Image (cartoon, rainbow, N blue to C red):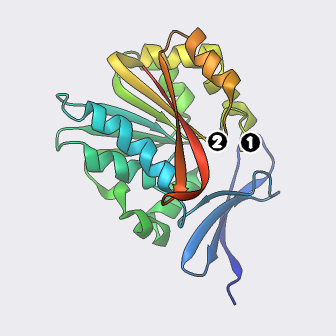
């Protein structure tokens, strides 16, 4: 009988609790210590994380020296999918706030996504993606955000800036002309769609299966 085995934990800044990595049979699972939000990530169901990396990067793949910013390393699946679409000259910058998550991806967890952090086109920073968005203007062809369970910021309340009108306008300034912002969410949020439009984006909301072609669906907003 499979059991949850706690492998490691890492503090969530300003929250006073940990984010925990569990082994469950052949899979890995990431949850908050207090259980809020349930299973935030697992290695069995990552179809929507793949789509978050694949779809926007396929759109910009033909651009010269394409640059991509990913907010949230997670289990590495979004990074792996993005790299699979981009050419050898592309650069992908990943901002991950939790040092433990970076460490987990360098260990056995990383094998599930094919160790994308080892790709020479990828640079992983122990950094708040909000700081990059506030300072690096017109630097990226695509910005991919998966820092929480969605715009409500279940993992870290401090991420609420990213989903505010000010934060979305910061994303817009950080994009090169013709760039695309993609935002992952576990659920639909019509208010966020309206907020994207109010920030000056043209918005396409897509529902993507979490695993294969059945079961739960997640939401990805593509904002241009």
- Whole-percent x, y for residue 183 in the image: 53, 33
Residue at image point 32% right, 17% down: 178
Q: Is residue 205 visible?
A: yes
| Picture layout, residue 191 above or below residue 157 | above
Q: How many marks?
A: 2
Check the picture and name the quadrant holding the C terminus.
top left
Residue farthest to the front, as pictured: 214
Q: Which mark is residue 70?
A: none
- Mark 2 vs 1: CB contact within 8 A: yes
Viewer-closest of 60 and 170 = 60
Residue at image point 28% right, 50% down: 84
Left or right: where does residue 135 sit relative to residue 142? right
Left or right: where does residue 84 sit relative to residue 69? left
Reading the image, the residue beneath label 1 is 154
- Whole-percent x, y for residue 20 in the image: 69, 62
> In what element is the residue under mark 1?
loop
**Around disc 2, counting alpha carbons within 10 Å, would you say few (fewer than 14), some (14 to 19), or many (20 or more)?**
many
| Picture layout, residue 100 above or below residue 62 | below
Viewer-closest of 86 and 22 = 86
Q: Is residue 97 visible?
A: no
Left or right: where does residue 214 sit relative to residue 93? right
How far apart marks 2 and 1 lie (CA) works out to: 6 Å
Mark 2 or 1, nearer chain start? 2
> In what element is the residue under mark 2?
loop
**Around disc 1, counting alpha carbons within 10 Å, would you say few (fewer than 14), some (14 to 19), or many (20 or more)?**
some
Residue at image point 44% right, 38% down: 70
Q: Which mark is residue 148?
A: 2
- Whole-percent x, y for residue 179 in the image: 35, 21
Check the picture and name the quadrant holding the N terminus.
bottom right
| Picture layout, residue 6 above or below residue 207 | below
């Amino acid at each position: 009988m499979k059991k949850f085995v706690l492998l490691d934990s890492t503090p969530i800044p300003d929250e006073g609790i940990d984010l925990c990595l569990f082994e469950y049979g052949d899979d890995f699972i990431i949850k908050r210590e207090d259980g809020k939000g349930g299973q935030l990530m697992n290695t069995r169901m990552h179809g929507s994380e793949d789509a978050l990396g694949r779809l926007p990067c396929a759109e910009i793949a033909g651009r010269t020296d394409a640059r991509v910013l990913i907010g949230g390393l997670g289990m590495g699946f979004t990074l792996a999918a993005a790299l699979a679409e981009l050419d050898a000259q592309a650069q992908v910058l990943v901002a991950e706030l939790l040092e433990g998550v970076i460490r987990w991806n360098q260990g056995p967890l990383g094998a599930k996504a094919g160790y994308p952090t080892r790709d020479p086109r990828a640079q992983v920073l122990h950094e708040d993606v909000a700081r990059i968005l506030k300072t690096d203007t017109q630097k990226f062809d695509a910005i991919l955000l998966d820092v929480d369970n969605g715009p409500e910021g279940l993992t870290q309340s401090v991420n609420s800036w990213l989903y505010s009108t000010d934060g979305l306008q910061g994303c817009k300034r950080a994009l090169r002309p013709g760039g695309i912002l993609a935002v992952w969410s576990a659920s639909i949020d019509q208010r966020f769609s309206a907020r994207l439009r109010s920030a000056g984006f043209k918005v396409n909301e897509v529902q993507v299966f979490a695993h294969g072609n059945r079961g739960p669906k997640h939401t990805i907003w593509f904002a241009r």
